[in-house]
Image: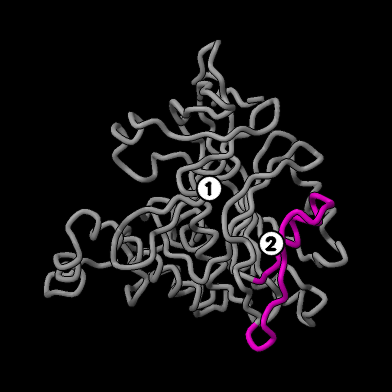
Amino acid sequence: MITDDFFKNQCEENDKVGRIALSSHGIYSILIDQGTVEGRLPGRFHHHTIEVKDFPAVGDWVVYQKEVQGKVLIDRVLRRKTLLSRKKAGTTTDEQVMVANADVVLIVTALTKEWNVRRIERYVHQVYESGAMPVIVCTKKDLCDTVSRCLYEIERVAPGVPVHAINTLTGEGVEGLAEEFRPGETITLIGSSGVGKSTLINRLLSAETQKTNAVRSRDDRGRHTTTHRELFELPSGTMIIDTPGMRELQLWGDESTIGETFQDIDQLSEGCKFRDCQHESEPGCNVLAAIHEGELDEQRLESYRKLKRELRRLELKDKYGTHRTNRMLHGPNKING
């Protein structure tokens, strides 16, 4: 069942291995060669597991052992290749795992009132942070009179990221998107409610597998039709994971991968006079010069600063706590960035 040597090399010859297809309240649906089986975690797993992120997630490969009445016990989770997470909502700094071992993440956004390039930037960064590759999918192109303009805006905020404009209801553009999928790889979809993720999956599966609802006309917002994460296999052999819609994406990670999202600013920074240039008012700043010449959007730079501040705050809160972090960022000896 496993074709990737990364996972094969973690298994013994007689290991029974399956993949988490669905997780709900401690009960797991595990995909194996013969179909699916129901699995659960033994008490020792809970005893030895410290962090929530180490529990099985949809997309994980697990080693299991048989139990009575057709159910199985999960022994261990294989080391992950990629991990798509976000910060849990609220004031904590806890990690919420969305999907494990996705090779490609489809960032799905609608070409309607939902359209927001700053949100796309956030999604792109989080995908790079996970270790997967981003692909942007723009749905509802039939409802947009400025498709070319929107695609141009995406190219400005996500250089080098593949972009597809599609109509999930008629299937226009979906075939071209599916041609990029490879047998054996895993795709997942993220985006707001109502952008058409479930409709796209139904189109790819050629079946009404996922329930869909109409969006509200006043704001194009959906109703969280998908309420859980679930893995499916496409006819091509590609695995695809649907996820619930998100009202917001709170970033998870650190500053180390932000250069992948903002490659244009990083490249411009190499021409700055000072190595530690903050791109604010320093003489010889190549980034500010690019803005002045119209080569770089000023909002792009502001978004870069905002994401860096957010990731820095998350890092400090995790290390020092909320109160000390506020003093470090806003006090007389505040940290720049």
Residue at 52%, 19% (x, y): give it.
9
Cα separation between marks 2 and 1: 15 Å
- Badge 1 density bin: few <14, some 14–19, many ≥20, Cα 10 Å: many
Q: Quadrant of the C terminus?
A: bottom left
Callout 1: helix, strand or loop?
strand
Task: State whether residue 191 is above or below residue 186.
Answer: below
Q: Could you say whether the residue bearing mark 2 is in a helix, strand or loop?
A: helix
Q: Which residues are magenta?
A: 194-219
Instruction: Judge by depth and name the residue closer to the eye, 149 or 189.
Output: 189
Q: Look at the image and tell me in which quarter the N terminus lies.
A: top right
* Residue 324 marker: none
In the image, what residue type sits under mark 1?
Answer: Val
Q: Is residue 330 left or right of residue 214?
A: left
Residue at point 39%, 71% (across, down)? 306
Write down the quadrant of residue 58 in the picture: top right
Tag 2 residue: 197
| Foreground pick, 154 / 276 | 154
Q: Residue at x 65, y 46 (%)?
A: 187
- The kind of residue tagged 2 is Lys
Q: Is residue 236 left or right of residue 334?
A: right
Position in image of residue 55 (x %, y %): 41, 40
The image quarter containing residue 173 is: bottom right
Whether 198 is among the magenta residues is yes
Check the image and name the residue furthest to the bottom: 218
Residue 82 visible in the picture? yes
Q: Is residue 188 left or right of residue 235?
A: left
Q: Position of residue 272 (x, y in %)?
A: 39, 63
Q: Which residue is mark 1?
A: 99
x, y percentage for residue 103? 61, 42
Relative to 57, residue 275 above or below: below
